[in-house]
Each structure stands twice: as C-alpha cells, then as structure tokens.
Amino acid sequence: MTSLYRSEQGKKAILHLYDEKLESLSIEYQYKIVDTSFGKTNVIVTGEPSNPPLFIIHGSNGCAPISLETYPNLSTQFQVFAVDVLAQPNKSAEIRLSMKDDSYGKWMNEIIVSLKLDKVTLVGFSFGGLAILKTLINNESKIKEVYLSAPAYIVNGNPLKALFKVFIPMKWFIRTKKIKFLEKFLDEIFTEKDEFAVKYLSQVFLHFNMDFTPVPIISKTEAQKITTPITLIAAKKDIMFPGEKMLKRASKIFTSLKRTVLLEDSKHVLNSMDNAKIEELILTK
C-alpha cells in the first residue's frame, strides 16, 4: 500500500507534533488499537470506565489529541474515546474510505462493537460530523445521542468562495512554503489564532497527501430514518458549511433534531469560548 505521507521524515515530523500535543494535555490516558475490517484504528481513552462512553471524532487533517484539547472536561462525566480517523495525519491506518457509501458508519460501529460499548454519545466536528451521520445511517442501535459541531454532510458552501479563499492559499503555501499563504488560509477557517495549528498544518500540507474529494450531502430519505437525538451547532461565518443554510436544511430533513445553536461570530473552526459552550451543553444535558 502506498503511504499517504510524502516522506518518512515528514511522517515523523507530524507524529512528533501529535505526541507533543497529547503530552501537553497532562491527562491520564491509554491507547487502544482496534482492528476493523477497514484497518487498524488508534483510540485514546481517558476518564473512568464506570462513566458512560463518549466518542470524539475530529475533522479533516486532524487527530485525537486536538479533539481532547477542544473538550477538556468531558472526562469528568464520561469515559472519553478520542478516535484517530482513518487516512488522516495521525496514528490510524492510512486507508481512505468512500464518502459515497456507509463505509465510515460501518467502521465506527465496528469500533463500538469491538470495545463492547452501548448507549454511546457521539461528538464530532466538521468531517467528524459526516462520520457520525454515516454511523447513524448504518446502525444507530448503540448510539444514545449525538452532538455535531459545524459538521460536513448536511450542506456545502459556495465552491468558488472556497476555491479562492481556502484552497488557492493552501496550494500557494505548498508551492512556495511562504507562511503568509498559510496564515491567509487559517484566517478564513479559524475564528481565533491557533499557534499549534500553524505548526501542525504547515507539516500536514507539505508532507501529507490530503483528500480533496468533494463532500457529499445527506439525502432527505436517509436523514428522516435517523431516530437518535441530534444537537446541531452551526457557525454563521463558516465558509465551508454555512451555518444559516445548514440550520434551514437540517430543520426540514431531520425528524430527531433535538436542539440547534447558531454561533453568530464563529468561522468554521470555533474559538475556545464557543467550544466551552458546547462542552457545557454536553455536560448539562
């Protein structure tokens, strides 16, 4: 199998940053390697085993330690399973799944079954939202509730805006290695400046073969079959998955929509204050 990393040196640099972020959290954790039919999946587990299970699923070009940093207090009430999504710059297998079928859902359900879990709460950001919705479509019997933050798979933004404001700056950074292009990209995507994102994504963009496949959207038929309670958090200034457009469509297609939140001042990657609000929603449900 051809590696998704452009070089072994680049892979080591990215995984060094992964370890650096995880250790900076100063938490007690353990790794679990779960064998699935799609590939080995790395899961970071923290919190008491007696607490109810909660999965956090990160977005594109992300990793589990970033998820754990985003919601640092969930482990006070849950046993948290932070999943490294397959084919992303992390410690899971480099096997890319199709977004057109329910492969991501089968994969997630295999992890849940392998870990012998039930009544699982799922929390996902961006691409993690797609993985969660695919999970519900595939088999929602072991899922208690889901929280989707600026998720993929419900609506897409204007492709021309995304091209000129997001993808072209990314490509110019890859071509020139000039930090100004990376900062331009980050300014469109991130609500607040994130120094780790600068370090991590600069390595990912240069040394990892990213997936530029267009993200599909869920059909009304699939959405209406879901019965699991959904809390949907959307960002008004999100160029990738516009918040108002998302909430408008979600209200029409999901029958199990429990709660919606529109973050008025947020771009796609939320700031720490808004992430704290989402964490509070989960902890006080």
Image (cartoon, grey):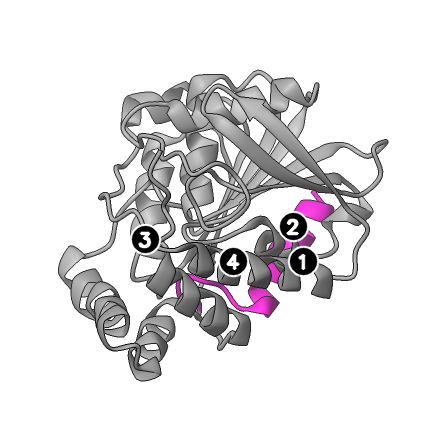
Nearest the viewer among 209 and 201 is 209
Q: Residues within 10 Å of mark 1 (few under 14, many from 20)?
A: some
Helix, strand or loop status at disc 2: helix
Q: Single out the mark in the foreground, 2 or 4.
A: 4
Query: Which image quadrant: the N terminus?
Result: top left
Provide the residue designation for mark 2. Answer: 281
Q: Would you say residue 222 is visible in this rendering?
A: yes
Mark 1 sits on what residue? 22
For marks 3 and 4 on the same chain, the one whose residue lies earlier in the sequence: 4
Residue 108 position within the rendered picture, expressed as x and y whole percent measured from the top left: 52, 27
For marks 1 and 2, the one nearer the N-term is 1
Say what amino acid the circle numbered 1 marks.
Answer: Leu
Q: Which label was assigned to residue 12?
A: 4
Residue depicted at x 86% and y 31%: 50
Looking at the rendering, the stretch of residues picked out in magenta corresponds to: 266-285
Number of dots carrying numbers: 4
Q: Say which residue appears at 39% left-offset and 24% top-offset.
A: 103
Instruction: For marks 3 and 4, give the CA distance.
Output: 32 Å
Q: Nearer the viewer, mark 1 or mark 2?
A: 1
Q: Which residue is mark 3?
A: 241
Determine whether, in the image, residue 207 is placed left or right of residue 220.
right
Q: Nearer the viewer, mark 3 or mark 2?
A: 3
Is the residue under label 4 in contact with that under label 2 (CB below 8 Å)? no
Q: Going by the image, does 281 lie left or right of 231?
A: right
Residue 132, compared with residue 171, is above or below; it is above
The image position of residue 31, as x and y in percent, is 70, 40
Q: Quadrant of residue 112?
A: top right
| Few, some or many residues within 10 Å of mark 2 (<14, 14–19, 20+) | few
